[in-house]
Amino acid sequence: MKTPRELILQRHQSVEPKLEAIRGEDLAACARATAAQPSRQLDPSFSLTFVAMKFWQESIRPWRRLWAGMAAIWLVLLALNLATRETPKMAGHQTAPPDPEFLAALREQQRLMRQWLEPIAPPPAATPKIPGPRSERPQTIVLA
Amino acid sequence: MRVVTEHERLPVPEARSGQAEAWNVLLARYRLPLYAYVFELVHQEQTSLDIVQETFISAARNIGRLQDDEKFGSWLFSIAHQKCVQQWRRQYPEAVPLDPQDECYADIGAGPRELLIGKEQEAEFMRLLDQLAWPHRAVLLLHFVEDFSLDEIARITGTPLGTVKSRLHYARKALKKLLENQYENPA
């Protein structure tokens, strides 16, 4: 007679050698590594200046020539980009001289349009003359 | 490698401070029960091995957050359980949710050590275990393999205590029925 626990564990006994691949040393190293992380975060010297210094020391300084080279490449690319952007602008300003025949046709069109529109336009309405106040009217006294 | 007995203190503080020997003790104590639990849920050897390994790595990374050292076992199983749920959802994305709240509250009956299975019932017991629905199987395995309390099982599986009680009751009832049938109609 066996308890369910004994029965279930017995069923998987054969996999034990494969499970031995998980090593305590690796787990201990993992625990140590993560234990070190929070203390670094809680360090009072942890500030923006500290981060900037750390970044400079660890990321920029060891490869300063590489960074300088990359910056130079970027500057060249920027300059090239600006130079190529100006070319279409210049091309846009150089417009071809207008064709005299085209201009004549355009003027003719405009003249015809004015002619057609003139009769349609209502004549200016005659504004009725409204007399001003009696007091402001000039009083002409005719003397006999 | 030293193996801890059931009532011996687990070297959790030593493991927290990164002692390899302490981790070896914890591995020796938990790797097979953890594998058995995971395999009975996942039913794939390689996936189960991966989950057990990932569980221990996750435990090593997060052991600093464990408040109560006595709860190391249930904490470890809860990590494994979450990974099993993730695996299950990847495997069966269209399946029904794992937490049906459809059962009634009931007394769970005798403890796992009081239940004894005869040699002729072993295969039938394992077959029944496989037939149980995922949530019932998880609860029953935690109860049988590690004898976790109901509170601990609720914490591990992330389900309410009442649901754990009813699931355990259902699973044990089905098991009892099987064993009674075996006694009444021996092959």
Image (spheres, coloured by chain):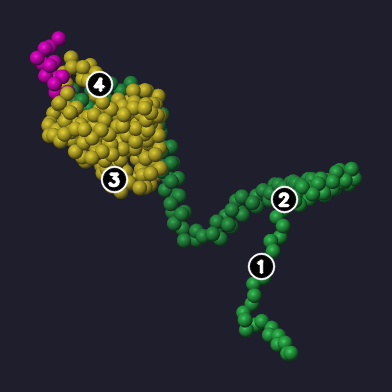
Chain colours: A green, B yellow
For the residue carrying disc 2, how many other residues have a C-alpha within 10 Å: few (<14), some (14-19), or many (20+)?
few
Label 2 sits on a secondary structure element that is helix
Q: Residue at label 2?
A: A120
Give the percent coordinates (x, y) of residue A128.
66, 67
Find residue B72 and report its image quarter.
top left
At horizontal 11% and vertical 12% (from top left) the residue drawn is B185
Dot 4 and dot 3 within a common chain: yes
Residue at image coords 70%, 87%: A141
Left or right side of A136 for A23: left
What separation in Å lies between label 3 and label 2 (alpha carbons)? 100 Å
x and y percentages locating residue A117 in the rendered image: 75, 50
Which quarter of the rendered picture does the C terminus of chain A lie within? Answer: bottom right
Question: Which image quarter holds the N terminus of chain A?
Answer: top left
Query: Regarding mark 3 in the picture, which secondary structure is present there?
Result: helix
Q: Are marks 1 and 3 in contact (CB under 8 Å)?
A: no
Eyeballing the image, is B16 above or below B131?
Answer: below
Does any portion of residue B18 appear in the rendered image?
Answer: yes
- Subunit of label 3: B
Name the residue that disc number 3 marks. B69
Q: What is the residue that sits farthest to the right in this orientation?
A: A100
The chain ID associated with circle 2 is A
What residue is rendered at 43% in x and 46% in y? Answer: A34
| Residue extent of the magenta highlight | B175-187
Nearer to me, B73 or B140 = B140
Q: Closer to the observer: label 2 or label 1? A: 1
**Mark 4: amino acid:** Gln
Q: Which residue is mark 1?
A: A128
Q: CA distance from mark 4 to mark 3?
A: 35 Å
Query: Can residue A1 be seen from the camera position used here?
Result: no
Give the chain of mark 1: A
Would you say the magenta stretch is mainly helix, strand or loop?
A: helix
Name the residue carrying label 4: B131
